[in-house]
Image: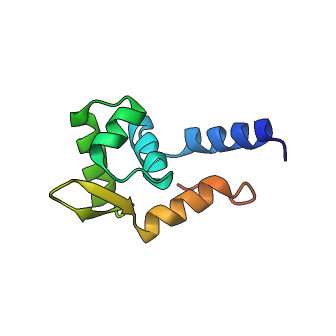
């Protein structure tokens, strides 16, 4: 698979997911290794308040796990990892 094919399939899969665009962006950022709310906000371009709302929403949904409430650091929860597997496995039906 060419890189452009991969990117198009991945973006198409993201668009069909029922999460909001901001939530999808935050989930992908955490999956890419960003844990800190400030880093996620800076890299995604989301305001701090939107980022906080999305992180808490994703945690409530069981897709993220807060590893440090004081410094607001998050990692993927098992359900978040499953969600990403669906986004990246182009042979499965989309989540939702």
Q: Position of residue 74 (x, y in %)?
A: 32, 58
* As drawn, 20 above or below 80: above
Residue 84, quarter of the rendered image: bottom right
Q: Residue furthest bottom?
A: 78
Vertical position of residue 35 compared to residue 21: above or below: below
Question: Residue shown at 57%/38% (left/top)?
Answer: 15
- Residue 57 picture location, percent across and down: 28, 51
Residue occupying the point 48% across, 54% down: 31
Relative height, residue 49 to residue 23 (above, below):
above
Left or right: 95 in relation to 9? left
Looking at the image, which residue is at 46% across and 43% down? 24
- Residue drawn at 14 percent across, 57 percent down: 70
Q: Nearer the viewer, residue 19 or 10?
A: 10
Colour mapping:
rainbow
Count of labels in the image: 0
Q: Quadrant of residue 73?
A: bottom left
- Residue that sits furthest to the right in the current view: 1
Tell me if 1 is positioned left or right of 15 in this view.
right
Residue 88, how many percent across, how many down? 65, 55
Name the foreground residue: 15 vs 31. 31
In this rendering, does residue 2 appear at all? yes
Residue 94 can be seen in this image: no
């Amino acid at each position: 698979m060419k890189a452009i094919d991969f990117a198009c399939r991945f973006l198409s899969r993201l668009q069909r997911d029922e999460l909001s665009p901001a939530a999808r962006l935050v989930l992908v950022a955490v999956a890419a290794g960003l844990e800190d709310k400030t880093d996620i906000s800076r890299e995604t371009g989301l305001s701090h308040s939107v980022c906080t709302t999305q992180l808490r929403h994703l945690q409530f949904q069981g897709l993220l796990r807060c590893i440090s409430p004081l410094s607001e650091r998050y990692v993927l929860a098992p359900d978040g990892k499953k969600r990403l597997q669906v986004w990246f496995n182009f042979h499965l039906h989309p989540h939702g």
